[in-house]
Every structure is written in structure tokens, then in C-alpha cells.
Image (tube, rainbow, N blue to C red):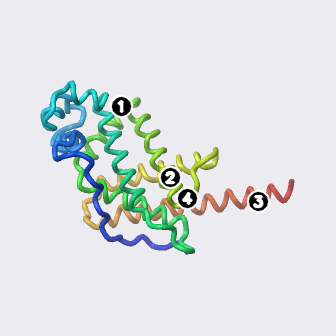
Amino acid sequence: MARRATRRRSTPRPRRRATARDPIDAALALAAAKPWRDVTFVEIAARAGTDEAALRRAYRSKWAIVDAFVQRIDDAVAGGTAPEADGEPIRDRLLDALLRRIDLLAPHKAAVASIARDTAMMPPAALCASLRTVRSMARILDGAGAGARGPFGLLRAKALTAIYLSSLWVWLNDDDPEMARTMAYLDRRLNEAERLVRLCEGIGARRTRQA
């Protein structure tokens, strides 16, 4: 029987890898204040206390800064993953990891909403973001012991990406600090995925016996 989603204790925030003038933090602060599409590279450089040329040597574009932020979150999620508990279902490990990821995004919710809205309106950016999220979800699958290699692993990563991204939009509209609606949605979607996996495994086993 699937375990009900419960609120986990807060996750330690990712460690800063730069100073208070970190360009990632500067970009997030600007994105929280206005639409991401209106944020310029010059503004990010000024807020970070550097010049545009130096910033471009470190990041090719605004989207490269977003990618670095996602990498920071990925590293924090991986660093906070507990050793696999004996007998703990993979589904529960995935739920814990996805909730931890959203916890880490919470301090930057306004910026995430700004970036997400503008990304959705730009097909090339949306495609790149989707591919980047598939890599993030593959890392979570590996950490949970589900495996994300090979064609079936890629399918699992894409399925988890769909679950995570739809849950992210629910979270962006969830004003409850305890994220009750987000957790219920995520819990339900993982249950649906678990049932689908079992159904596919059953069909595969029957075909193997009939061969």
C-alpha cells in the first residue's frame, strides 16, 4: 500500500559556491522583481558587482545562468540523499527527492515563477529546459536506486520529468507553506506511475512466458 505523503523536515539550503555577489543570486533577485524576459545581462552584471564582459566570460547567456542554478539545485538534492533504507520502496525515495528539490526552490519561488512563465512561451528555451530536467530526473532515479540508463531508463526519466514539471506548476500556485496541495498532487501522480509500471511489467512477464 502506498505511503501517504508527509511533510519532511526542512532541507539544508545548498551551500553557496561564491560570494554575496554571486551572478546566480543576482539573476534570481532580478527575476523575482520583474519578468525574466525583461532582465538584461547588463543588469545582472551590475547587481553582481562586475562588468558585462567578465560575466559573459563565465556565462554565455542568461539561460546559462539558469542552467548553473539548476545544477546547484541538482547537487544539493544529490548531497541530501540519504543512504537507501532497507525495504523502503523506490516510489517513496522518489517522493522524498522531489519534495526536497521543491524545498530548495522555495526561497526563490518568485524568480522560478518568472523564469518558468517566460520559458513556457519560448519553444527553444522550453525544449532546452525539458532536456535539462530529464538529466536532473535521471540523477534522482539513479540516487533512488531506480536506474536511468538504457532505453527503459530514459523512458523512466522522461516520465518522472512529466510528473515533476506538472507538480512544479501546482506548487507555483500553492500558497500553503506546508504545500499540502502540491504533496497530494505529487503523491497521486507517483501512485499512478507505479500502477502503470506494474501493469507493463505484468504484460512483459506474460509475453515472456508465451514466447
Quadrant position of residue 120? top left
Dots 4 and 2: beta carbons under 8 Å? yes
Residue beneath disc 4: 193
Q: Earlier in the sequence, mark 3 or mark 4?
A: 4
Q: Residue at x 48, y 55 (%)?
A: 140
> Distance between the Cα atoms at labels 1 and 2?
22 Å
Instruction: Name the N-terminal-most of marks 1 and 2.
Output: 1
- Disc 3: which residue: 205
- Residue furthest to the right in view is 211
Q: Position of residue 97 (x, y in %)?
A: 43, 60
How far apart are the two marked residues, 1 and 3, measured between alpha carbons? Answer: 42 Å
Left or right of 143? Residue 35 is left
Q: Secondary structure at mark 3?
A: helix
Screen quadrant of the N terminus = bottom right
Which of marks 2 and 3 precedes in the sequence? Answer: 2
Work out whether 104 lies above or below 25.
below
